[in-house]
Image (cartoon, rainbow, N blue to C red):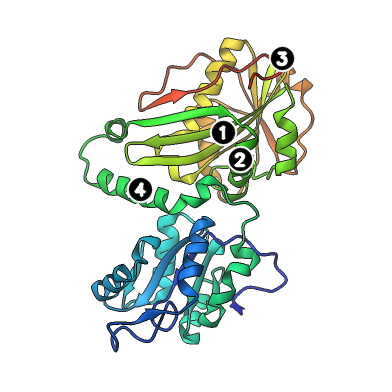
Amino acid sequence: MTEGKPVSEPPVAVKCLVWDLDNTLWRGTLLEDDEVLPFEVVRDVITTLDERGILQSIASKNDHDHAWSRLQALGLADYFVLPHIGWGPKSTSVRDIAERLNFAHRTMAFIDDQPAERAEVAYQLPEVRCYSAEDVARLTALPEFSPAVVTVDSRQRRTMYQSGFRRDAERAGFTGPDEEFLRTLDIRMDIARATERELSRVEELTLRTSQMNATGVHYSDAVLRGLLTDPAHEVLVITMADRFGPHGAVGIVLLEKHPAVWHLKLLATSCRVVSYGAGTTVLGWLADRAAHAGVHLAADFRRTDRNRMMEVAYRFAGFAEADCACTGALAAPGEEGVERLHLTPAPQPPPTTLRLTAPELADAALPHSR
């Protein structure tokens, strides 16, 4: 059923499925029949994957305007992001889609009726999972297409990405410094304590975010649920929005507070908001709050192949390797390869490119007010 991936490997969640059109999405060839219709199950598969937060795109050898007009007439065009319809190699299309989405190849999937097209993609992009058109009806039952939890953000993921592409287009046409452009977006960041309702969004962030994840550690729903009721811990969810619409939940902070030091166990932010300085803003806010509380900050960090940008954010904020007596109260890192960085914080100015709303961090000895 799949090509280019050993069966023994555990399934990695698919973030984007790239569709062929002729004899895959619809029955027949568009160049021979202007009135081609989708296979019976295709519409249900497309809408189900969309509701689960799995993005979908197209890599088809067709005339672009002709094919796109047919998708619009069928009421399916809006479901696809970054469609590649033309005459180039399909591996090039899949690669370009992954790069534009900033997705690892192992989270991409491709479906096509032609064995030669699947073989070409599998050869050029061995981590991309390839499926035959015969598998369409079974896709929604496969574990890689079946997230354990579907959140509010999952259901609007496609529209959030489409809004992001409109932002990118406006940025490309803007003349002036990036900081000035960001001010035109009217960006709003909200940092709030997680509630039971947001737990699934928090867990999803720890699973989906790798480039801007300080440790790569996954926190399960059960662990997070226990931390919500622990007065020494803050579980914070970061959401963002601007004049184009919501970004949804874009980050998580897990903080354990001790009398002399606040321990930042995890900071993860979505790669979608890297260009808005989300991680830097959160670290600045934490440093400011810690300075006002008279405590130091210690942060766990584990280097990976993909989180170099997060390391830069930590270093830019002033975190460094240092021996300080304040860290003596902290348990040793529970994960292999985790370093502990230290910061003696100072008051920070408010951000200049967005409006920040955030809670007062309660004293570690007191239960959180909810």
Disc with the residue nearer the chain's start (2 vs 1): 2
Crowd tier of the residue under label 3, counting other residues whose Cα lies within 10 Å: few below 14, some 14–19, many 20 or above: few
Q: What number is the disc on residue 237? A: 1
Horizontally, residue 191 falls left or right of residue 349, namely right
Crowd tier of the residue under label 2, counting other residues whose Cα lies within 10 Å: few below 14, some 14–19, many 20 or above: many
Q: Distance between the residues labelled 2 and 1?
A: 7 Å
SS for dot 2: helix
Residue 305, above or below 350: below
Q: Name the residue under label 3.
A: 366
Disc with the residue nearer the chain's start (3 vs 2): 2
Q: What number is the disc on residue 29? A: none
Q: Mark 2 points at which residue?
A: 202
Mark 2 is on which residue type? Val
Mark 4 is on which residue type? Ser
Crowd tier of the residue under label 4, counting other residues whose Cα lies within 10 Å: few below 14, some 14–19, many 20 or above: some
Looking at the image, do the residues carrying marks 4 and 2 touch, with CB atoms under 8 Å apart?
no
Give the residue displayed 64% in from the left and 14% down from the top. Answer: 295
Q: How far apart are marks 1 and 4 (CA)?
A: 21 Å
Q: How far apart are marks 3 and 2 (CA)?
A: 23 Å
